[in-house]
Image (cartoon, rainbow, N blue to C red):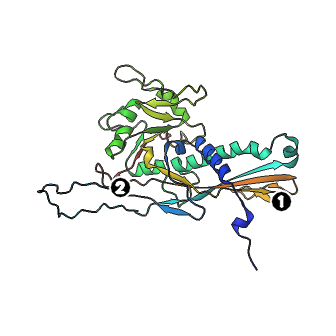
C-alpha cells in the first residue's frame, strides 16, 4: 500500500508567486536586506556547502629571474564543514468561516503581508539572538561575536578608558568598528534596538557635530523608510524587534560576509478540519471542525551562514569574526 508523501499533501507555491513572496519577505527582514543572498536552493536540497577559504593570487617568478618553464601554482578553494542548512519557518493563520465569507476580498490575500512580516521577525531574531534557532544553523551573531572577543558591555572600561561614553564604544579605539576592522573586515551596516536610538541622538564628534544622522535619501521617494548612519555606515532599527535591548543594543559588521538562501518549495495548505495546539502547553487553541474555522499554513525553508573566510589580517578563525556587538549593562543583583 502506498503512503501519502509530503508533496502529495501540500500545494507548492507557483514560481511567480514565490518571486513576489520572497521579495516581500526581504522587505520585512532587516537581516535579509543587509546580508548577501545566495542563489535559491532547489526543492531537493537541504544543505549546500559554503566557501570558507578565499582564492589567493600570486606573481609568477616572484623573487627570481624570469623563467618560461616555472610551473604555475594552484589556487585552493575549500569548503570547511560550513553549510547552508535549510530549516522550516511555519506560520498558521486560523480564520472563522463567517469572517472569511463576509469580507469582499480574499481573506488569505489579506493575511499574506502579516504572514511575511511574522516570518521575517522569526528569521531576524534567530540570526541575531538565537531565539528558536534550530541546531543546524550556526551560532547567532551575538554568540559568535562574544566567542571571538568582539563584544563590549555598556558600562565596562574600554582599554585604558575607565569611563567611556557611547561614542567610544562605537567609534573609539577598541570600539565596535575597530574590533571588526582588526579582524580584517570593514563595517558596512549596523542593526540596533529601537530603544537605543535615543541614546545615539546626542552623540557628537570632536567638532561638536552629530555622528548619528539621517542618511542621504536616494531618489525622490517620500515614502522611503528613513535610514540613519553612524560615521557613514547605514544603521537600521527594525520595528520587528530583530534586536531586543535586553540582549543587545547594537550589532555592527561586514554584512556581505553573512549569506542566506531560500529554498524554492514554499508550501501553502488550507485546512478545514484538525486542531491547533499551543506548542508550549499542548492546550487545544482551536478545533477547526467544531469552531467552524479554516486555517492556512505557510511553510518557508530558509538557510544562513557566516563563512568567516581566512584573511591576511587575522588568520586564526577562533579570533576572527565579521561582527561586533554592544551589550546592555547587566541588571544589578
Disc 1 on helix, strand or loop? loop
| Residue 46 x/y as whole percent | 56, 63
Q: Nearer the viewer, residue 132 or 256?
A: 256
Q: 215 left or right of 159?
A: right
**Disc 1 packing (10 Å; few <14; some 14–19; many ≥20):** some
Which callout, 1 or 2, points to the residue nearer the camera?
A: 2
Task: Reply above or below: 227 against 132.
Answer: above
**Disc 2 packing (10 Å; few <14; some 14–19; many ≥20):** some
> Which residue is depicted at the point 65% across and 43% down?
117
Q: Furthest-top residue in view?
A: 208
Q: Which residue is mark 1?
A: 273
> Which residue is depicted at the point 77% across and 47% down?
108
Q: 64 left or right of 117?
A: left
> Which residue is depicted at the point 29% across and 36% down?
160
Q: Furthest-bottom residue in view?
A: 1
The CA distance from mark 1 to mark 2 is 52 Å
Q: Nearer the viewer, residue 10 or 306?
A: 10
Q: Nearer the viewer, residue 217 or 220?
A: 220
Disc 2 on helix, strand or loop? loop
Quadrant of the snapshot with the N terminus: bottom right
Q: Which residue is mark 2?
A: 54
Q: 231 left or right of 118?
A: left
Dot placed on the residue nearer the N-terminal end, 1 or 2: 2
Amino acid at each position: 500500500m502506498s503512503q501519502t508523501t509530503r508533496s502529495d499533501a501540500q500545494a507548492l507555491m507557483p514560481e511567480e508567486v514565490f518571486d513576489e513572496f520572497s521579495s516581500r519577505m526581504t522587505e520585512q527582514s532587516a537581516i535579509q536586506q543587509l546580508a548577501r543572498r545566495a542563489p535559491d536552493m532547489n526543492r531537493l536540497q537541504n544543505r549546500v556547502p559554503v566557501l570558507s577559504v578565499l582564492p589567493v593570487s600570486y606573481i609568477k617568478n616572484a623573487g627570481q629571474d624570469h623563467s618560461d618553464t616555472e610551473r604555475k601554482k594552484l589556487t585552493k578553494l575549500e569548503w570547511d564543514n560550513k553549510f547552508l542548512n535549510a530549516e522550516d519557518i511555519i506560520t498558521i493563520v486560523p480564520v472563522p468561516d463567517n469572517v472569511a465569507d463576509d469580507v469582499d476580498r480574499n481573506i488569505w490575500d489579506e493575511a499574506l503581508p502579516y504572514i511575511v512580516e511574522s516570518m521575517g521577525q522569526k528569521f531576524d531574531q534567530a540570526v541575531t539572538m538565537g531565539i528558536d534557532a534550530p541546531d543546524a544553523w550556526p551560532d547567532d551573531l551575538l554568540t559568535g561575536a562574544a566567542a571571538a572577543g568582539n563584544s563590549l558591555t555598556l558600562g565596562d572600561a574600554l582599554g585604558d578608558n575607565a569611563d567611556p561614553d557611547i561614542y567610544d564604544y562605537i567609534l573609539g579605539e577598541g570600539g565596535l568598528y575597530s574590533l571588526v576592522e582588526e579582524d580584517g573586515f570593514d563595517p558596512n551596516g549596523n542593526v540596533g534596538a529601537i530603544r537605543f536610538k535615543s541614546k545615539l541622538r546626542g552623540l557628537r564628534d570632536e567638532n561638536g557635530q552629530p555622528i548619528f544622522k539621517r542618511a542621504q535619501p536616494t531618489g525622490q521617494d517620500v515614502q522611503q523608510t528613513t535610514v540613519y548612519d553612524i560615521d557613514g555606515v547605514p544603521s537600521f532599527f527594525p520595528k520587528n524587534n530583530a534586536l531586543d535591548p535586553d540582549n543587545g543594543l547594537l550589532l555592527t559588521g561586514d554584512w556581505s560576509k553573512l549569506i542566506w538562501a531560500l529554498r524554492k518549495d514554499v508550501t501553502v495548505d488550507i485546512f478545514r478540519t484538525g486542531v491547533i495546539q499551543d506548542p508550549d502547553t499542548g492546550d487545544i487553541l482551536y478545533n477547526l471542525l467544531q469552531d467552524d474555522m479554516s486555517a492556512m499554513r505557510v511553510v518557508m525553508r530558509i538557510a544562513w551562514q557566516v563563512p568567516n573566510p581566512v584573511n591576511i589580517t587575522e588568520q586564526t578563525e577562533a579570533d576572527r569574526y565579521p561582527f561586533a556587538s554592544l551589550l546592555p549593562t547587566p541588571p544589578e543583583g
